[in-house]
Amino acid sequence: MANDHVIVRHLDKVTDIKYPLSHSITIQKNWMAQVLCLGVLFCAQTHEPLKISERTRQPNLNVSTSRKGRLNRLLKPHKLNIEVSPHRAVSAVRLMRIELGGAFADLLNDKGKGSGDNEMAYVERTLGFCTRELKDQDLRLVTDIVGGTIRWRRYLDHLIISLCHDKNTYKSLEPLLLQILRIGFYEIVKLNMPPYAVVDENVRLAKTALRPGAGNMVNGILRKLVLLKEGKSLPLPKVEGDDRAQARALATLYSHPVWMVRRWTKYLGQEEAINLMIWNNNDPSFSLRANHRRGVSRAALVTRLNELKVPHQISLHLQEFVRIKTGLQTVIQAGLLREGLCSVQDESAGLVVSVMDPQPGESIVDCCAAPGGKTLYMASHLNGQGMVFAVDINKGRLRILKETAKSHHVDGVITTIHADLRTLVNNSPVKSNKVLLDAPCSGLGVLSKTCAGIGN
């Protein structure tokens, strides 16, 4: 390895990122003390290990858990930058974690638990500084920008490549710089934010997180984009040529994988395929399920939504479900999901559970259970009597299921089994009254809600 680089390994398992020393990334000793366990490796000509001063150690403080995170942030020395936009800094770091670390966008939203302190801690560990306090409105913008940037990634990258005039330049962009450009392009082209503000804020982020030259590059590219948009001359591909060429153009215009466009065009026709892609790119609607195990009826959930001023509709098919088009972040920030008072669950999943018709005292095996929405719903119908065996090959998602089961007060009737279903039957068979097998599929029916696979 060359002696003129720094490699940083982050807490959230983001791939080791190699930064040239010329990027002027500031890593302060007090910050190193906080992240020593993350394995921050400094490779310089001296090859000397990091030394942590005794003065950076924090005293034991007897404070409540709810106040501990914020109090720690106040007590720990850190580099504060109040000029950088907080929602853009958080969005850039989230996008890094998703693309380089393989994190799931939906799980990041849930893990945040509405905590601006939690999000800013990731920014500080990744970028070396923190911004002003993250407000609820900022968190809603983060969700919108991260989801939209992922959803429209193919489209955005096409524009970035076109304005760079060289695919090699695009490929050589640092991961953080690329995410900042994607954010700026999405804000200008899809969110129609004021161009001057978008350019100014993203330039400032690039200069602070990377170096002045990176900010100058962002400035030039974003200003060029603004001029092209105002002149209605964005460099977009034309749908022409043979079937493959048209599929590639449509894949770029609607930010879907080429293979998906070709398949839909073949079986549905081009017009219907375009309509389906437009549908996928629209803002999705969601359903909330009231958790009666926590004593929450649908009427009580509706009352709470009214208090939060979240528009909603009553489900026409299921007694415990309420539909919402907007306001999901408001629900999250209010703590309804964190406290287990309700959960986000599609009505189609609820209908599956209604067909299963779980009864108290029954033993049920839920094969391929993660992330566990149907498991939790079935467990709530057992009224504390019986057992749902949740089987899945993904250990991490089973752990999240167990944590959620506690907040829903159904952990006593759920047993998680980490196993491959194909070998479980032979190695340790489980007897039950009912078996639910929702086998892994393409997931094309829920693309509008997931966004993670669309923009690739």
Image (spheres, rainbow, N blue to C red):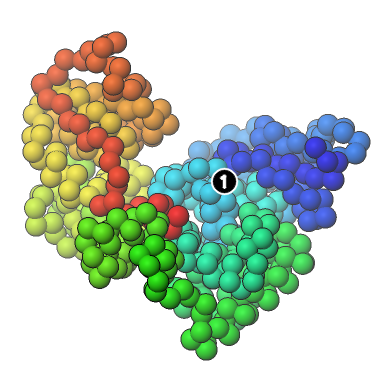
Q: Is residue 419 visible?
A: yes
For this rendering, which residue is in front, 145 or 296? Answer: 145
Badge 1: residue crowd in 10 Å (few <14, some 14–19, many ≥20): some
Give the residue at x 47% y 66%. 155
Q: Quadrant of the C terminus?
A: bottom left
Q: Is residue 33 visible?
A: no
Give the residue at x 40% y 71%. 241
Total tally of numbered discs in the picture: 1
Give the residue at x 34% y 21%. 419
Which residue is outermost to the bottom? 231
For this rendering, which residue is in front, 258 or 21? Answer: 258
Residue 253 position in % (x across, y down)? 41, 69
Q: Quadrant of the N terminus?
A: top right
Residue 285 position in % (x across, y down)? 26, 60
Residue 133 position in % (x across, y down)? 57, 59
- In the rendered structure, which amino acid carries the disc numbered 1? Leu
Image position of 320 (left or right of 17): left
Under circle 1, the secondary element is: helix
Q: Look at the picture and state if 8 lies above or below 225.
A: above
Q: Look at the picture and state if 429 lies above or below 134.
A: above
Q: Which residue is mark 1?
A: 100
Q: For residue 89, which quarter of the picture?
A: bottom right
Which residue is outermost to the right? 46
For this rendering, which residue is in front, 25 or 240? Answer: 240
For this rendering, which residue is in front, 298 or 198? Answer: 198
Give the residue at x 58% y 59%. 179
Residue 304 position in % (x across, y down)? 25, 57
Which residue is outermost to the top? 427
Image position of 48 (left or right of 33): right
Q: For residue 315, which quarter of the picture?
A: bottom left
